[in-house]
Image: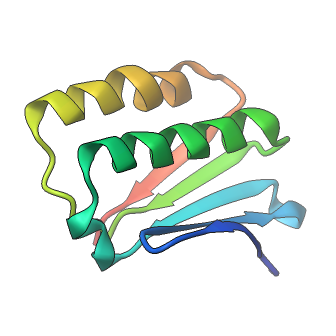
Amino acid sequence: MESKIVYQDDYISIAVEEENNLLIDTWNEKSDVLSGEEFQNLLLTFKKMVEQSNVSYVISDVSSFMLPMTPELQQWAINSYNTFIANNELFQTRIYNA
């Protein structure tokens, strides 16, 4: 199962496994210095990639995600991204946090 990185920065990498129809986002420990605005922009970037891709599955690896989430930022994420994924019948999502 070969994955191809389609986006990478200091905080997250996003890869596609075409043979499995899968998009994978992996956060790293540097995410502890993200600003709320940077987090929002990254999540919107990932959402756009999900919308534009032909994948059926999304895996989010948040095991190294370190951003302290304010209640306001959590609510924004729920309204902007989580609801989109939950309401989209094309996607099956798994979030891993070991």
Toward which corner of the image does residue 5 lie, by quadrant? Answer: bottom right
Whether residue 64 is visible here, answered yes or no, is no
Residue 92 position in % (x across, y down) = 61, 40
Whether residue 73 is visible here, answered yes or no, is yes
Residue 29 position in % (x across, y down) = 29, 77
- Colour style of the rendered protein structure: rainbow
Residue 10 position in % (x across, y down) = 45, 74
- The single residue placed furthest to the right in the displayed view is 19
Residue 98 position in % (x across, y down) = 28, 72
In front here: 23 or 49? 49
**The N terminus lies in which quarter of the figure?**
bottom right
Count numbered badges in the picture: 0
Residue at image x 15%, y 28%?
72
Q: In this rendering, is residue 73 above or below 2?
A: above
Toward which corner of the image does residue 76 lie, by quadrant? Answer: top left
Q: Is residue 30 left or right of residue 43?
A: left
Q: Is residue 79 left or right of residue 88?
A: left
Residue at image x 23%, y 25%?
75
In front here: 27 or 11? 11
Residue at image x 61%, y 50%?
58
Q: Is residue 74 left or right of residue 2?
A: left
